[in-house]
Image: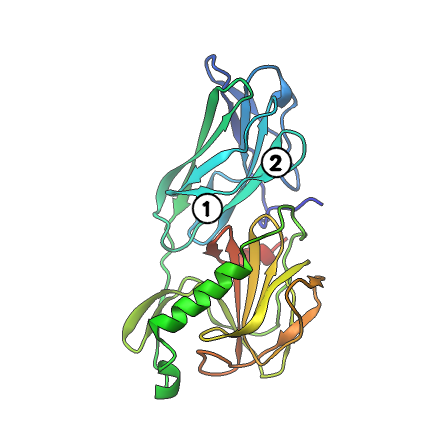
């Protein structure tokens, strides 16, 4: 199954091929879907071809990589924005991954570095630069009633993190979805991605998803095909469902009044997984919809555009 970049336009990019000799620039052709490897990517020698889906992105957006080695080599080690990223096998000597950014990702030029070790023990590294553009995210101030405010404890935060961490310990290595993602409910956005959240006069960090205003009981549908990894009541997120779509892509559906799925269940795009509610830390009925890309919470709305 092939996935397409969640953007109306794809950008042709250059590939840097390192083979021990001076670097040679190779021209790529990027088609609808993952970037197509150039014809000489399998030439002899310890070459690595790194292809990126775009040269720049805004905070909260993601970038897709395809990596190909000319001969069998180790699993690629990928570094971007100060951390390591998983690389997933794509058949033969090809690998792919998706890198996410959020409001905490520094704006400016960033290096994507990919290193492999060949069968002969040689370490080969290829690097590309991309630009992350700053976004001026707004602020929101929320005051909870005493009963709800009592939920904001360090213990509850840790309980929720542990449950999510355990649920996402094993993820599907292949893409299970097709772009674009489906909006899980129809309704106005009441709070957008990246908003700086201030609860009880204390800064609590950025909003890691999108809130949709909807009546209690409104059906919530899966944004894409996947596997349910978590379906239970959490201290802050209330009744929650997390779906694994492969390649480290996870969608979350929070504050549900009802859960209609179970962990391990295969889900089809558009299938009802629960209903809108106000469980957990919520001021009223709404759906919080989130998207994680290899552990980074990104803006899900660009992924709904073909």
**Residue 272 spot, x, y in % from top left:** 69, 71
Q: In the image, 57: left or right of 262? A: left
Q: Which mark is residue 35?
A: 2
Q: Which residue is mark 1?
A: 57
Q: Residues within 10 Å of mark 1 (few under 14, many from 20)?
A: some
**Can residue 59 be seen?**
yes
**Can residue 192 be seen?**
no
**Residue 254 spot, x, y in % from top left:** 53, 72
Q: First in sequence: mark 1 or mark 2?
A: 2
What whole-number distance in Å separates the C-alpha atoms at marks 1 and 2?
A: 17 Å
Q: In the image, 45: left or right of 153? A: right
Q: Residue at x 53, y 27 (%)?
A: 15
Q: Residues within 10 Å of mark 2 (few under 14, many from 20)?
A: many
**Residue 28 spot, x, y in % from top left:** 59, 28
17 w.r.t. 187: above or below: above
115 w.r.t. 231: above or below: above
Q: Residue at x 40, y 45 (%)?
A: 132
Residue 1 lies in quadrant: top right
């Amino acid at each position: 199954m092939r996935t397409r970049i969640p953007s109306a336009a794809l950008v042709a990019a250059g590939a840097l091929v390192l083979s021990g000799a001076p670097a040679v620039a190779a021209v790529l052709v990027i088609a609808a879907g993952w970037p197509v490897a150039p014809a000489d990517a399998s030439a002899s020698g310890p070459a690595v071809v790194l292809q990126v889906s775009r040269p720049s992105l805004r905070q909260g957006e993601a970038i897709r990589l395809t990596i190909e080695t000319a001969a069998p080599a180790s699993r690629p080690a990928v570094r971007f924005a100060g951390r390591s990223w998983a690389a997933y096998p794509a058949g033969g000597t090809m690998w792919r991954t998706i890198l996410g950014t959020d409001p905490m990702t520094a704006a400016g030029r960033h290096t994507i570095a990919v290193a492999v070790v060949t069968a002969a023990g040689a370490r080969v590294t290829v690097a590309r630069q991309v630009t992350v553009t700053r976004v001026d995210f707004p602020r929101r101030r929320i005051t909870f009633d005493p009963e709800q405010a009592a939920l904001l404890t360090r213990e509850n935060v840790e309980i929720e993190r542990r449950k999510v961490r355990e649920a996402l310990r094993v993820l599907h290595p292949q893409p299970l979805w097709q772009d674009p993602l489906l909006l899980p409910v129809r309704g106005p956005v009441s709070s957008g991605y990246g908003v700086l959240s201030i609860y009880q006069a204390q800064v609590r960090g950025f909003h890691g998803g999108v809130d949709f205003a909807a009546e209690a009981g409104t059906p919530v549908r899966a944004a894409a095909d996947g596997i349910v990894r978590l379906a239970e009541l959490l201290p802050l997120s209330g009744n929650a469902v997390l779906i694994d779509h492969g390649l480290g892509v996870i969608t979350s559906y929070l504050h549900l009044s009802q859960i209609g799925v179970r962990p391990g269940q295969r889900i089809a795009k558009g299938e009802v997984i629960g209903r809108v509610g106000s469980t957990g830390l919520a001021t009223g009925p709404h759906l919080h919809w989130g998207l994680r890309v290899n552990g980074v919470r990104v803006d899900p709305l660009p992924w709904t555009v073909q």
